[in-house]
Image (cartoon, rainbow, N blue to C red):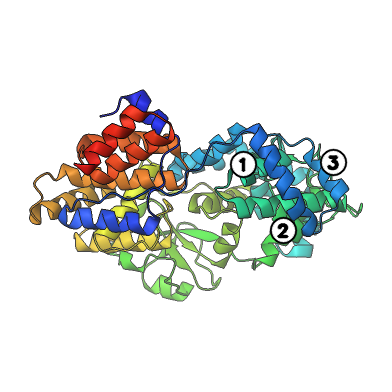
């Protein structure tokens, strides 16, 4: 087994072996029958970036930018200040590691202080927000809530130089096409005269202004509400940014007067198979099933589906078409509920009444990967192994729960993951696997491979070490070690890994 320091160092480079499809296939085989993998050659290794490499990339990018319509003088003035930022790469690599339970997220997102500040911000911009509501048909409380979650009502709009962030991310290559496109749009913004390179500051990922628009969204949806000839989302005056947010929501189908969602109570004996984004019913149909709002009456706002973000032990919501519109801003259920509930609180509504399963913690990135891998391996296909607990994964969780006689609420919890692990080990034993723990080693090796494919070297290291401890003679894992060591010219470890792999 590699020492801790050596393992981490090796896997900062790491060999990219195989693809996602092969990874899932390998895990499936291991869990079903405890089969051993075979060695595979590595794909191209992504080298760490540096300042000189970024400048070479900028030089090459100039020709593509000019071909896309960017004036050469504009390009040169803007890009002369661009610098490589390793912190941006670090944050991009690790963003998926930061997880909260929905109740922990909402505790901050809809805190009493944020509600109080939201009411104050709405009052201060009452005239503008009322005009925006009239013009775009988007409730002022919703616009205010997005403002609150994105920049704390303009008090923190980000201080990273957007051009450097986007150039660093494009040069890095993990999502090159996306960030090159965003960088081109940032240059188009400068070319149009909406702002200057010095004022173009925002988040590490390139989102800007009071309501955190990416450059492409700015290009398509930003508004000059003040009438000064510029779409200025960067200034202390938030009006252009607020109008731009309303225009964005209107474009994606916001329905004025329709709630994002309504907290509801479910009757005893409720059929949880009816909880899903793909199941739509009218208010009358939900009432007939015994579903009741926590407060008031269940109005006729169009078809709604039932969302259980905390499973049977958490709050239940009927969600409407406007829920999906807010998702265009951020696809996380927690964010959408945060925006919607904060808007309700700003409008005078009360807090969520239901309790939450506070005994649970959030699944880590690796655990979400393992959950999807285990589900797919056991015949409950999640379609993608991407650590995102979306509708497809929720449906797969529900199918697994049904197979185990559990309540099919689709809730992906640590307890559910443990049930999956137990089922996998039972299946391995049933098929005659001599060492059931080796199944987990195979899964961990697959997770490491997926992290390497995402260019997350630091995240892959501990996973690979755990996989080696459980499967010290696995040729696929040993090949990972060997090729990784070879890339780092650590010949002793490399030869040892290859020698054991051949054996």
**Viewed as shown, does residue 287 lie left or right of 40?**
right
Q: How many marks?
A: 3
SS for callout 1: helix
Horizontal and vertical percent for residue 433?
10, 50
Residue carrying label 3? 77
Horizontal and vertical percent for residue 498?
28, 39
Q: Residue at x 59, y 58 (%)?
A: 326
Residue carrying label 1? 115
Q: CA distance from mark 2 to mark 3?
A: 33 Å
SS for callout 3: helix
- The image quadrant that residue 8 belongs to is top left
Residue 89 in sight from this viewpoint: yes
Q: Which mark is residue 246?
A: 2
Q: Which comes before the other along the chain, label 2 or label 1? A: 1
Residue furthest to the right in view is 228
Query: For this rendering, which residue is in front, 408 or 426?
Result: 426
Q: Residue at x 25, y 51 (%)?
A: 38
Marks 2,3: beta carbons within 8 A: no
**Viewed as shown, does residue 225 lie left or right of 121?**
right
Q: Residue at x 32, y 27 (%)?
A: 492
SS for callout 2: helix
Horizontal and vertical percent for residue 22?
34, 57
Image quarter in which the C terminus is found: top left
Q: Which comes before the other along the chain, label 3 or label 1? A: 3
Image quarter in which the N terminus is found: top left
**Viewed as shown, does residue 259 lie left or right of 97?**
right
């Amino acid at each position: 087994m590699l020492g801790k320091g050596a393992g981490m160092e090796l896997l900062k480079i790491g060999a990219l072996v195989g693809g996602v499809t092969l990874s899932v296939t390998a895990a499936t085989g291991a869990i079903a029958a405890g089969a051993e993998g075979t060695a595979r050659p590595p794909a191209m290794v992504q080298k760490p970036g540096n300042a000189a490499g970024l400048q070479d990339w900028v030089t090459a990018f100039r020709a593509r930018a000019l071909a896309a319509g960017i004036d050469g003088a504009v390009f040169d003035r803007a890009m002369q200040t661009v610098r490589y930022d390793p912190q941006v790469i670090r944050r991009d690599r690790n963003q998926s590691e930061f997880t909260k339970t929905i109740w922990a997220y909402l505790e901050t997102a809809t805190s009493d202080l944020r509600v109080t500040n939201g009411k104050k911000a709405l009052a201060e911009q009452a005239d503008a927000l009322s005009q925006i509501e009239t013009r775009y048909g988007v409730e002022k409380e919703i616009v205010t809530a997005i403002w609150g979650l994105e920049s704390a009502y303009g008090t923190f709009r980000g201080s990273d130089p957007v051009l450097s962030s986007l150039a660093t991310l494009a040069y890095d290559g993990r999502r090159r096409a996306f960030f090159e496109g965003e960088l081109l749009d940032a240059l188009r913004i400068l070319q149009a005269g909406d702002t200057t390179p010095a004022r173009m500051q925002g988040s590490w990922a390139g989102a800007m202004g009071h309501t955190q628009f990416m450059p492409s969204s700015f290009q398509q949806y930003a508004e000059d509400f003040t009438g000064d000839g510029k779409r200025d989302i960067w200034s202390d005056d938030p009006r252009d940014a607020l109008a731009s947010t309303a225009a964005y929501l209107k474009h994606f189908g916001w329905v004025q007067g329709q709630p994002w969602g309504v907290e509801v109570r479910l009757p005893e004996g409720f059929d949880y198979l009816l909880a899903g984004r793909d199941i739509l019913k009218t208010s009358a149909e939900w009432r007939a099933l015994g579903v009741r709002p926590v407060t008031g009456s269940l109005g006729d706002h169009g078809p709604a589906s039932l969302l259980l973000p905390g499973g049977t032990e958490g709050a239940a919501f009927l969600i409407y078409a406007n829920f999906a519109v807010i998702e265009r801003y951020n696809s996380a259920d927690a964010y959408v509920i945060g925006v919607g509930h904060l808007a309700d609180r700003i409008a005078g509504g009360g807090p969520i009444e239901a309790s939450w399963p506070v005994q649970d913690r959030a699944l880590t990135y690796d655990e979400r990967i393992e959950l999807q891998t285990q589900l797919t391996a056991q015949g409950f296909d999640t379609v993608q192994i991407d650590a995102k607990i979306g509708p497809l994964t929720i449906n797969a969780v529900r199918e697994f729960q049904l197979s185990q006689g559990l309540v099919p609420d689709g809730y992906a919890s640590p307890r559910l993951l443990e049930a999956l692990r137990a089922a996998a080990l039972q299946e391995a034993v049933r098929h005659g696997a001599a060492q059931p723990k080796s199944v987990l080693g195979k899964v961990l090796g697959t997770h490491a491979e997926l992290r390497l494919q995402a260019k997350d070297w630091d995240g892959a290291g501990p996973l690979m070490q755990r996989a080696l401890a459980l499967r010290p003679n696995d040729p696929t894992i040993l090949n990972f070690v060997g090729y990784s060591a070879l890339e780092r010219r650590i010949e002793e470890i490399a030869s040892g890994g290859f020698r054991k792999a051949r054996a």
